[in-house]
Image (cartoon, rainbow, N blue to C red):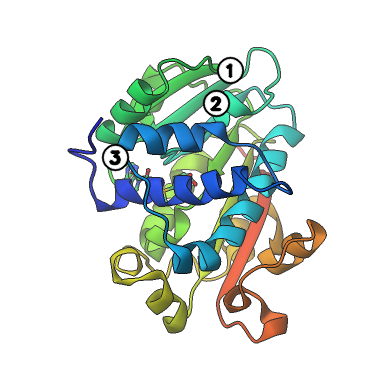
Amino acid sequence: MDLDGIDAIGRTAFEVALLRAAEDRRPDRLFADPCARLFLEAAGITEEKPDFTALMGPQVAVRTRFLDDALLSGGVRQVVLVASGMDGRPWRLDWPYGTEVFEIDQAPVLRFKDTAASSLTARCVRRPVVADLRSDWTGSLRAAGFRPGRPTAWLTEGLLYALDEAAADGLLATITGLSAAGSTLAFDHVEASAALYAAIGPDLARLWRPGPVEPARWLTRHGWEPDVSELADIAAKYGRRIHPAYDPAAGGTARAWLGQAVLLGQER
Ligand SMILES: C[S@@+](CC[C@H](N)C(=O)[O-])C[C@H]1O[C@@H](n2cnc3c(N)ncnc32)[C@H](O)[C@@H]1O
């Protein structure tokens, strides 16, 4: 299968898959993700990038495991993976019976994924939703069967740092408007330094934006109660060393967070 029609931001999903496939091969892996290898094989991607893997591999491994646990923790049966890319969670997580997992992404990305995963059986009711997050995507999500009255577990992973502050605000306002009280939002976010951008490489760095300045304050402003941790602290809990660029104790200047927030009661 070729990647025709998948734009630069869409192709970043395969960079994440490379890192998850590398984690899957480790004897001490934090999660299993056979889908990542399958997606890479379907795309004909074999290239390893040692510098990129050293920098981003532990970050993605730790965030994936943390967000797996966050998504399953509440037993919520309506889940939305916002900008799902090559996320293998519909096939690899042990979802409660009857869970509906909506995957929002661009048409070429979802087309590729649907074809590549056609031999797999999802462990949930999987509902792909073609949408551009820069325009109104609520109609597409509802048309796919999403019910705003039900508590929802949202995921924004590998996304917030591709949005500027206004776009991130708009996204969260939309998510909030679609969420019943008690809904959750699991996320990662990175505030990178110039050195980190340089190490990531110009192609990827070009896609990064400053994003929400500080996630806890940002979420509180939108009516969510956040529980935010530093990536370095979660990594230490898992016994995994992260790249020094992300580790304040090692003098790292990039800040990285993982968290989950709960929507407080609101007038609807
Ligand atoms: C870095 S990947 C992350 C994928 C996934 N969340 C993960 O962590 O594996 C970013 C994804 O965001 C999607 N994306 C970026 N901008 C988008 C937009 N405006 N509308 C829909 N999807 C978008 C891309 O197509 C890509 O799949």
174 or 250, nearer to the observer = 250
**Residue 49 bears which disc, if any?**
none
Q: Would you identify the image quadrant in which residue 38 lies?
A: top left
Residue 99 image offset from top left, x and y in percent: 62, 18
Residue 172 image offset from top left, x and y in percent: 48, 49
What quarter of the picture does the N terminus occupy? top left
Residue 24 image offset from top left, x and y in percent: 61, 42
The amino acid type of the residue labelled 1 equals: Cys
Name the residue that disc number 1 marks.
Answer: 124
The amino acid type of the residue labelled 3 equals: Asp
The amino acid type of the residue labelled 2 equals: Pro
Name the residue that disc number 2 marks.
Answer: 90
Q: Dot 1, how many residues are within 10 Å of its Cα: few (below 14), some (14-19), or many (20+)?
A: many
Discs 2, 1 touching: Cβ within 8 Å: yes
Residue at (55%, 26%) from the top-left corner? Answer: 90
Name the residue that disc number 3 marks.
Answer: 132
Mark nearest the camera among 3 and 2 is: 2
Name the secondary structure under disc 3. loop
